[in-house]
Each structure stands twice: as C-alpha cells, then as structure tokens.
Amino acid sequence: MTDTKFTVAICGAGVAGLTLAVALSKHPDIQIDLYEAADSLFEAGVGIGLWPRSWKIVEKFGLQRPLSSVALIPPESLPQISLNFRKSDEALGLNVNQLITPGMLTFHRPDFQRVLVDQLQSTTCHIHRSRRLVSYTNPQPGSEASRPPIQLRFDDGSSSTCDLLIGADGLHSTVRACMFQEIASKACAEGRSDDARQALQSIEPRWSGICMYRATYPAELLSRCYKRHRALREPTVYVGTNTQITVYPISRGTQISVTATLANFDLEDTPFDGPLMEDVPQDVILHEFDRWEPEVQALFQCADTASRWAVHTCPPLDTYVSDRVALIGDAAHAMLPHEGVGPGQAIEDAYLLATLLGNSKTTISTLPKILEIYDTIRRPFAQQAMNRSRENAMLYTLTFPGLTFDRPEDYDDTQKRRLSEVCYRIRKNWEWVWTTTIDEDIDRAVDMLERQG
Ligand SMILES: Cc1cc2nc3c(=O)[nH]c(=O)nc-3n(C[C@H](O)[C@H](O)[C@H](O)COP(=O)(O)OP(=O)(O)OC[C@H]3O[C@@H](n4cnc5c(N)ncnc54)[C@H](O)[C@@H]3O)c2cc1C
Ligand SMILES: *[C@@H]1O[C@H](CO)[C@@H](O)[C@H](O)[C@H]1NC(C)=O
C-alpha cells in the first residue's frame, strides 16, 4: 500500500470532474473523492463533441479504444466535414460557400461518462453519488507545518475533508460561489471595496443574449414535407441577420437534428426573464422564421415542439484558483457552444492539472503554488476560447461589427464578398482546434514547476 501524499475532493462528475479523476487515478499516492449531486451519473443525454486537439489528450490517457466503441464517428477515419453555408433570411436563399473542417468525434454524454467511470474501478477514487456540496471552509494556516484540512458540507447534512478541492460543478458552480464570496470578504475586510464588488460579480452566470432552439425528429418526416431536402444529404448552416441554424443527419441518417441560434447581443449581460429551458410549441418557432426561404420553414414544420434554452456563460474570472481550491471546466469558463469546445477545454484543464499534481516534486505544502501555475497557463487560453466562441456566434448570426447585412434581398458583389469573408473568418477562428496541441502548454507548466525548486 502506497502512502497517501494528499487527498483531493472533486466536486461534480461531468466531463471535467471524471476526466480529472481518471488522470489522477494513475497516481496511487493521491486519494480521490468524487462527489456528484445527482443520484445517477448517466442522465442528461446531450451530445458532446471532441475535436482533434482534445482527442489527442484522450489518447494519452489510453481512452481511445473504449471511447471509440461509443463514438459516433470512428476516430480512424476522421473525415473532412463540409458544412454548406447558405444565407436564407429571404424568400430565395443564396449558397455562399462550404465550411471545411476535420471531423468532430461525437458522443452521448452518458456514454462518455460510463467509459470514464469504468476506468475508475479498483483505483484510489471513491465516487459518492447524491452528495451535493453546499459550502466549504478553508482554514487559514495556524503553523506552516500542519494545516487543517478543507471542510466540506453537503445537502444531506454530511461533511467531509480534503487537502485540495476542485470545483468541476459546472455553470452554476457552488465552489465558484464560495470561492468568490471568500475573496470578496477578504477584500472588504481590507477596505478594497471595488475588488469585493468585482469578486461578487464572478458568481452568477450571465445571459449571452442568445436563445437556442433544439429539435430532433425522424428524417422521414422531413422528406415527406420537403422532397429531397438538402439537410437529408449533408450538414448545412443557414444564416441570416441575428440567426443561425445548423442542421445535420444523425443516427446514421435516420434522424435530423436542428439547432437554431437567435441572438440579440444588445441584451448580453442583462437578466434573462423566463425559464432557462422550456418546451415551445411549433407555431412560436414558425413565427420566428416566417420570412425565411421555404427549405428553412420546412425544418420547423416537421418539429411539433422544440426546447428553448437561454444560453448563459461564466463571467470572465480574474482567477481560477484560491489557495488550495481550483475551478475547472464549465465552473471556470462555461462558454457559447459555437465552436463546440466546452468539453475539450474541460479536458485540457483536467490533463494539465493532473500532470502538475502527479509530478513527484508536488507535495501537500506546494499545492497553492501548483494551482497558481495551472491558473497562469490555463486561464488566458480558456478565456481566448471563450472569446473565439463568442466571435464565431457573432459571425454566424451576421452581427459581427463591419460584417452585417442590412439589405438582405439585394446581393451585389460587395455583399457576396462580405459573406465569403464571414465564412473565411469563422474557419480561421476555429482552426486551432485541429492545427494545434496542448503539448507546449504542458511543457511550460512542468518547466515552471521544476524551476520552483
Ligand atoms: C444544457 C447544456 C447543453 C450543452 N450542449 C452542448 C453541446 O451540444 N455541445 C457541446 O460541445 N457542449 C455543450 N454543452 C457544454 C458542455 O456540456 C460542457 O462544456 C462540458 O460538458 C464540460 O462540462 P463540466 O464537466 O465542466 O460541467 P457539467 O457537464 O455541467 O458537469 C457538472 C457536474 O457537477 C454536478 N454538480 C453541480 N453542482 C454540484 C454540487 N454542488 N455538488 C456536487 N455536484 C454538483 C452536476 O450534477 C454535473 O454532473 C452544453 C451544456 C449544457 C448545460
Ligand atoms: C477576451 O475579450 C475581452 C473582452 O473583449 C478582452 O478584454 C480580453 O482581453 C480577451 N481575452 C483574451 C485572452 O483574448
């Protein structure tokens, strides 16, 4: 039996928390407790996608084999995906271009989680279900030698302790709330009231000004109401001012998935008035698109209902860490889904943090310094990913400054050039997910750790 170097509590068993647990479990001297609020880990059935940059990390964990058995595109044959890009907010649409990207591996979130949980069998990781963290306290050092552990409290009245707490608890993170309350109290006590206000603004998620509609239905319905619909054959993006629709065949072409983004960036950071997620009837959606070309209207004539989701993101944070507590994944940087990199950024956090924590030089007393390195390397990168996702959302909805369209029906050459420019910029903005790797950042982080001596 190996001696335990320190204990880590991970709050939240989503993509971020489970990936971190798997990465840390390779180090038998680190004891891991994973706390998840839900009683079942495998409920929310959303799709998650991984681009090559993230897939390369997953391969390093030795997860490629079990994951490829549940992936929707086999990784050996990452194809080029071409999205038709069409401007459609008028009676007659216009084909602009094709967006060519390498394939994205897609999973059902529950399948992905199940593969990771399987990896945790007979490791140092204990999974505790139905344990919702309510708050924590991080006692300040009495003497350098022996610091009291962090105290965790759960909603069933139970409590626990750890040497290191990782908040992987998503957009509405409890760990983030406690952490920034603590930072605010400290700033307040020191008379820094602006800093205190800033810290408190880091707690609540913000509305992006975007609502998304999602619907999935049998492909047969679509071919019945619109013969030889483009989306039955190939993934298509329809764009118009303030709106973007992505449609593609799923489940080997038997189902059609439609996602519509309705953006009003003037309302960004204002409170959203209404439920975060609700079902909306067909006529409400049809009304949104009544001026669009018929092939777009057909997409919604097939959907009896769709869910509407008010998309919230994490405020930009001044730090992801405080002493022995760190935030990873959506808890740190929930972003718009327009580059599909939310899960990938969660995996990058987990990989980098686990590499640092597992290093033989890392000890219980260097934990705060290790977290500082994580913050130094990961925060600017993840914030750039947030910015790019937002920029792409603006490009897609034709609201990017200088690239807007106020005379939709009138396509002169300038307008056409501008549309090609939109398409080009989206791809440019996106390229990093298949042309770069995390390796350099890992090297920089390890170098910083080793130079601490
Ligand atoms: C509705 C929705 C739809 C999305 N759709 C897409 C999509 O189509 N494509 C895409 O690429 N990305 C999508 N995302 C984003 C993507 O799911 C995340 O970026 C990614 O999964 C990383 O998530 P995470 O593990 O950090 O957080 P999450 O997946 O949110 O996991 C957090 C976990 O923490 C648990 N938890 C929360 N609070 C507590 C607590 N106090 N104590 C204990 N446990 C707690 C939760 O139950 C959950 O299991 C979507 C996100 C949401 C919310
Ligand atoms: C992200 O955008 C914000 C707001 O425009 C800006 O202040 C910040 O510097 C950007 N961050 C990065 C890493 O690009």
Image (cartoon, rainbow, N blue to C red):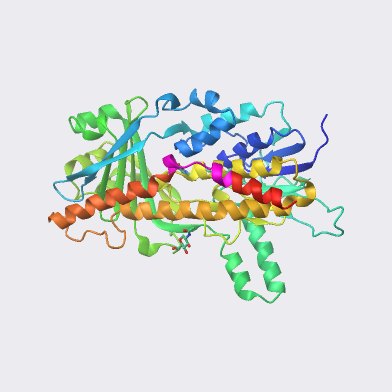
Can you see residue 47? no
Magenta region: which residues? 433-442
Which residue lies at the image location 36% right of the left edge and 64% below the top edge? 266
Specify the quadrant of the image occupied by residue 391.
bottom left
Quarter holding residue 121: top right
Image quadrant occupied by the N terminus: top right
Q: Nearer the viewer, residue 408 or 384?
A: 384
Q: Is residue 120 above or below residue 365?
A: above
Q: Is residue 290 left or right of residue 64?
A: left
User: Is residue 164 among the parts visible in the rendering?
Assistant: yes
- Which residue corresponds to the image point at 32% horizontal and 51% vertical from the top-left? 425
The percent coordinates of residue 301 (x first, y second) are: 24, 39
Q: Is residue 11 left or right of residue 250?
A: right
Magenta run includes residue 436: yes
- Percent of width and height locating residue 3: 83, 35
- Residue furthest to the bottom in view is 191
* 322 vs 179, nearest the viewer: 322
Give the image location of residue 232, x and y in percent.
25, 30
Image position of 76 (left or right of 262): right
Q: Is residue 45 magenta?
A: no
* Secondary structure mostly seen in the magenta stretch: helix
Camera-side residue: 230 or 207?
230
Q: Is residue 332 above or below residue 67?
A: below
Q: Determine the residue positioned at 34% across, 59% down.
A: 264
Residue found 67% across the figure and 52% down from its top: 371
* Number of numbered callouts drawn: 0
Horizontal and vertical percent for residue 268? 41, 62
Quadrant in the picture for residue 199: bottom right
